[in-house]
Amino acid sequence: MAKQFCGILLNTFKEPTQDGYSALTRVFLVWSVFERYADLADNPPPYSQLLSMVSRLKLNLLADQIERNDSEHKLYEFLHEQSLEHNRSYLERYRDGDRRGVIFYAAALRHIYVHGHLTAHPNGCQADNVQTICNTLSEFLLELISEDFSRRLKVAKAMR
């Protein structure tokens, strides 16, 4: 479902706001799948094993995309302020240069959105920027899961 999710329809909402909520819903679904996959892979936060398979280039491209769409750090500040302590520390690690922490944007988005404190315009952010950030994170996580699963299948087949 997370992979095939195309969006939600909200009567009377303008398209950018509806698209922002669709992207937030998608990142909620994708992060939930990622958490379950990480559990199955026996790789708890900070997901070091899964992230060790991701090139620095991919992490930098993801972080650059987020930073381009949050150049004033409004979303980061909102997420940091609203996050639980353990997610806040991962966001701080990202802020301080650990690019692997960029995926915790998705964790924070999911948590804050599900608990009703996040809208498509958090802290004055543009809905289209929120949409881009959420969709970029979702695609990154789905690709990470897919690549890791394919790798594990190849290893399992080779061990037969």
Image (cartoon, rainbow, N blue to C red):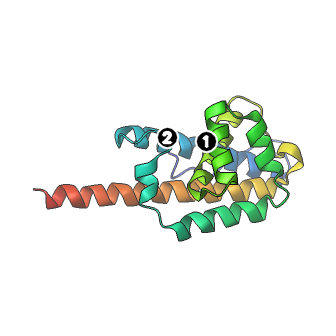
Question: Does residue 21 appear to the left or right of 141 in the view shown?
Answer: right
Considering every residue shown, the one lying at the far right of the view is 124
Please tell me which residue is depicted at 52% across the width and 54% down the height of the picture.
141
The quarter of the picture where the C terminus appears is: bottom left
At x 70%, y 53%, the residue is: 95
Q: Is residue 10 visible?
A: no
- Amino acid type at mark 2: Pro
Mark 2 in CB contact with mark 1 (< 8 angstroms)? yes
SS at badge 2: loop
Q: Position of residue 49 (x, y in %)?
A: 40, 51
* Residue 46, label in figure: none
Q: Residue 54: where, in percent of width, then height?
A: 46, 62
Residue 89: quarter of image: top right
Q: Residue at x 28, y 55 (%)?
A: 152
Quarter-of-image position of residue 84 = top right
Amino acid at dot 1: Ala
